[in-house]
């Protein structure tokens, strides 16, 4: 299996990410989905990563438990391998040594499948890296890639019920965005069988978006953010 996986995301409903405030204009747009330097909508890596991480965090499957154990064992081995060197570097500073030991203890005890997205204070562990997903060339038409939606929220102020009409500029249904994720630092730390398990697991979690239960961006309760994800694996290095 390759280290890079190409992803295509097709919007099944309008998509609003970030809700960038637009310049004030009477009768104009109140908020606009995030756009790139050319003014086209895109899907930030952080948005997809956050939604995918939430799916993985809530997963209680047997495979998720195996991946958690895999990371726990990796951290134990790393501690054993580096401990002499750490103690030599921190020689005489007992408090610093205790802090490092506690950091390892907590990370090992808290090991979970979401370590696939990185571990706080452990920079070189195997993790996935995502890039922003850009609108495919054939969809890059500013007159056709946005949808202008009006929404009205109703709220009560003291004894009076009021409405607040707002206008949103969202990425429309039927657009296709493309990007990739990289399986960083997996080779050398995990055996080939474990690497395949992690990759297949991540791909299955991505495909859960296609079931409609998981969505991207804002206003999910209003039907926004439904997407279909297609995963195309690449072999080898770039």
Image: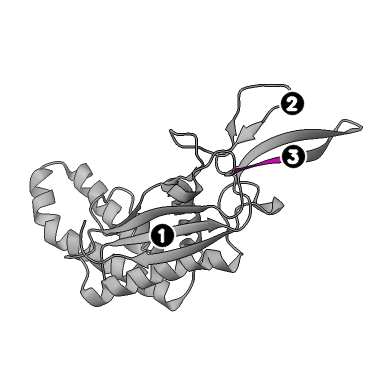
Near mark 3 (Cα within 10 A), the count class, few <14, some 14-19 or many ≥20, is: few
Rendered location of residue 125, percent (x, y): 25, 57
Rendering quarter of residue 82: bottom left
Secondary structure state at the residue bearing disc 2: loop
Per the rendered image, the range of residues in magenta is: 146-150
Rendered location of residue 132, percent (x, y): 40, 46
Q: Is residue 177 above or below residue 21?
A: below
> Is tag 1's residue or tag 3's residue first in the polypeptide sequence?
1
Quadrant in which the N terminus is drawn: bottom left
The residue carrying mark 3 is 150
Residue sitting at x 21%, y 43%: 96
Residue sitting at x 11%, y 42%: 92
**Residue 147 on the magenta span:** yes
Secondary structure state at the residue bearing disc 1: strand
**Magenta part mainly helix, strand or loop?**
strand
Mark 1 to mark 2: distance in Å?
37 Å
Q: Residue furthest right?
A: 159
The residue carrying mark 1 is 7
Q: Nearer the viewer, residue 238 or 154?
A: 238
**Res 27 label:** 2
> Is tag 1's residue or tag 2's residue first in the polypeptide sequence?
1
Near mark 1 (Cα within 10 A), the count class, few <14, some 14-19 or many ≥20, is: many
> Is tag 3's residue or tag 2's residue first in the polypeptide sequence?
2
Please give left or right for residue 160 compared with residue 182 in the image. right
Please give left or right for residue 2 compared with residue 80 in the image. right
Residue sitting at x 61%, y 53%: 173
Mark 1 to mark 3: distance in Å?
31 Å
């Amino acid at each position: 299996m390759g280290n890079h996986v190409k992803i295509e995301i097709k919007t099944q409903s309008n998509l609003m990410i970030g809700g960038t405030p637009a310049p004030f204009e009477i009768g104009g747009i109140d908020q606009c989905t995030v756009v790139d330097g050319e003014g086209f909508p895109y899907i930030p890596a952080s948005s997809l990563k956050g939604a995918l991480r939430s799916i993985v965090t809530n997963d209680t499957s047997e495979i998720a438990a195996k991946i958690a154990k895999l990371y726990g064992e990796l951290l134990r081995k790393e501690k054993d391998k580096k401990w002499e060197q750490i103690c030599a570097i921190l020689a005489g500073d007992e408090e610093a040594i205790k802090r490092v030991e506690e950091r390892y203890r907590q990370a090992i005890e808290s090991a979970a499948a979401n370590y696939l997205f990185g571990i706080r204070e452990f920079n070189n562990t195997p993790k996935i890296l995502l890039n922003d997903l850009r609108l495919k060339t054939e969809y890059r038409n500013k007159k056709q890639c946005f949808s202008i939606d009006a929404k009205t929220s109703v709220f009560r102020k003291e004894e009076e019920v009021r409405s607040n009409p707002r206008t949103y500029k969202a990425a429309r249904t039927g657009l296709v965005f493309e990007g990739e994720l990289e399986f960083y630092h997996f080779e050398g730390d995990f055996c080939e069988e474990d690497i395949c398990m992690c990759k297949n697991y991540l791909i299955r979690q991505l495909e859960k978006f296609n079931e409609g239960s998981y969505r991207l961006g804002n206003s999910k309760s209003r039907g926004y953010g439904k997407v279909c994800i297609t995963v195309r694996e690449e072999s080898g290095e770039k």
